[in-house]
């Protein structure tokens, strides 16, 4: 019903903004030194793009800081933003299904849509690629390529900014790799399968997922299966997410006497160039508390 309503709003809004889309095409035909107008869909992509664009382009995020991408639907204001943009940068892999109504429409006339998942080894159609810095590097390269093609006059600057940012992401990757190498216990249960790529890239084992689908919570049978899996695997860590504690997570933790650790899937958040690096480091700190037996939680340091 929600998707139908969003599509109806889209159909009603299109006639009102076709003129704006056509006018944008005219503007783009003769940029005359005009700054690129870039629209991203989620905070990680905003951080990536802002680091590449610097002060050379205008970057805006489509979703508000408190809105998640899974159940989102377009508003007429969003469509106007898309019509006024030169480039729309999306994660891909079905995360932004609500964009399907935009692609190929009159509003999309002249709008370049960049799928940042291009070139990434996909696991089980899981869209949470940004949670591994190794994937983030590929996404940054895809964004940089698009900006260079759209704004050749600033191509060298975009390339320089991207390479500098990728250097920081490589240092972040090295920091995570070094931390994980010292952990003897690397098995965990998660609320939903957001950290599949992170686990693959850094040698962790996601032994079980409590919520199989974002459309419905875990059944009693599912909870019982997870409890049995956790016992067999000797699980000592359950990873949940910020916000109210899902009932299934608390039930499993109580049954097994386990502590719940909250790590951020980064689908929502503040918009800044430094935000992605800060959140990845914050997640790593939580994982150290869960896995590193030498980590002193009272002082926040590893011994």
Image (tube, rainbow, N blue to C red):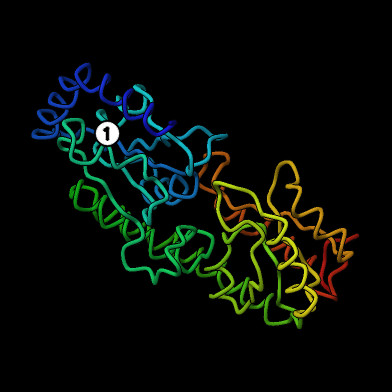
- Left or right? Give the position of 179 relative to 43: right
Q: Position of residue 92 (x, y in %)?
A: 36, 54
Q: Quadrant of the N terminus?
A: top left
Q: What residue is shown at x 47% (from left), y 42% (from top)? A: 69
- Counting every numbered tag in the picture gives 1
Q: Position of residue 218 (x, y in %)?
A: 66, 54
* Mark 1 neighbour class, 10 Å CA radius: few under 14, some 14 to 19, many 20 or more: many
Q: What residue is shown at x 27% (from left), y 42% (from top)? A: 87
Q: What residue is shown at x 15% (from left), y 35% (from top)? A: 109
Q: What residue is shown at x 38% (from left), y 57% (from top)? A: 93
Q: Quadrant of the C terminus?
A: bottom right
- Left or right? Give the position of 222 relative to 252: left
Q: Position of residue 291 (x, y in %)?
A: 77, 72
Q: Nearer the viewer, residue 231 or 10?
A: 231
- Left or right? Give the position of 274 relative to 18: right
Query: Is 117 situated above or below 79?
Result: below
Q: Position of residue 264 (x, y in %)?
A: 64, 52
Residue lying farthest to the top in this orientation: 16
Quickly name the residue at label 1. 85
Element under disc 1: loop
């Amino acid at each position: 019903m929600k998707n139908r309503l969003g599509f109806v709003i889209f159909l009603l809004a299109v006639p009102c903004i076709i003129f704006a889309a056509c006018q944008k095409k005219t503007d783009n035909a003769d940029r005359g030194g005009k700054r690129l107008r870039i629209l991203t869909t989620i905070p990680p992509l905003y951080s990536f793009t802002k680091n590449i664009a610097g002060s050379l382009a205008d970057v805006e995020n489509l979703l508000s800081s408190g809105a998640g991408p899974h159940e989102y639907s377009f508003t007429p204001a969003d469509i106007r933003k898309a019509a006024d943009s030169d480039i729309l940068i999306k994660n891909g892999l079905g995360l932004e299904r609500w964009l399907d109504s935009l692609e190929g429409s009159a509003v999309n006339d002249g709008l370049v849509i960049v799928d940042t998942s291009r070139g990434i080894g996909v696991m089980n159609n899981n869209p949470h690629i940004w949670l591994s810095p190794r994937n983030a590097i590929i996404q940054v390269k895809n964004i940089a390529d698009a900006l260079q093609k759209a704004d050749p006059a600033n191509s060298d600057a975009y390339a320089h900014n991207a390479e500098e940012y990728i250097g920081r992401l490589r240092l972040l990757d090295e920091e995570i790799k070094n931390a994980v190498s010292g952990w003897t216990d690397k098995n965990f249960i998660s609320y939903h399968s957001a950290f599949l790529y992170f686990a693959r890239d850094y040698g962790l084992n996601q032994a079980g997922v409590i919520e199989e689908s974002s459309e419905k919570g875990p059944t009693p049978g599912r909870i019982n299966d997870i409890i049995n899996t956790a016992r067999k695997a000797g699980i000592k860590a359950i990873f949940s997410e910020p916000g109210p504690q899902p009932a299934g997570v608390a039930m499993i933790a109580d049954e097994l006497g386990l502590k719940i650790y909250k790590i951020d899937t980064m689908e929502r958040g503040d918009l800044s160039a430094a935000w992605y690096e800060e959140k990845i480091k914050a997640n790593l700190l939580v994982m150290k508390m869960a896995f590193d037996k030498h980590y002193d939680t009272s002082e926040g340091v590893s011994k």
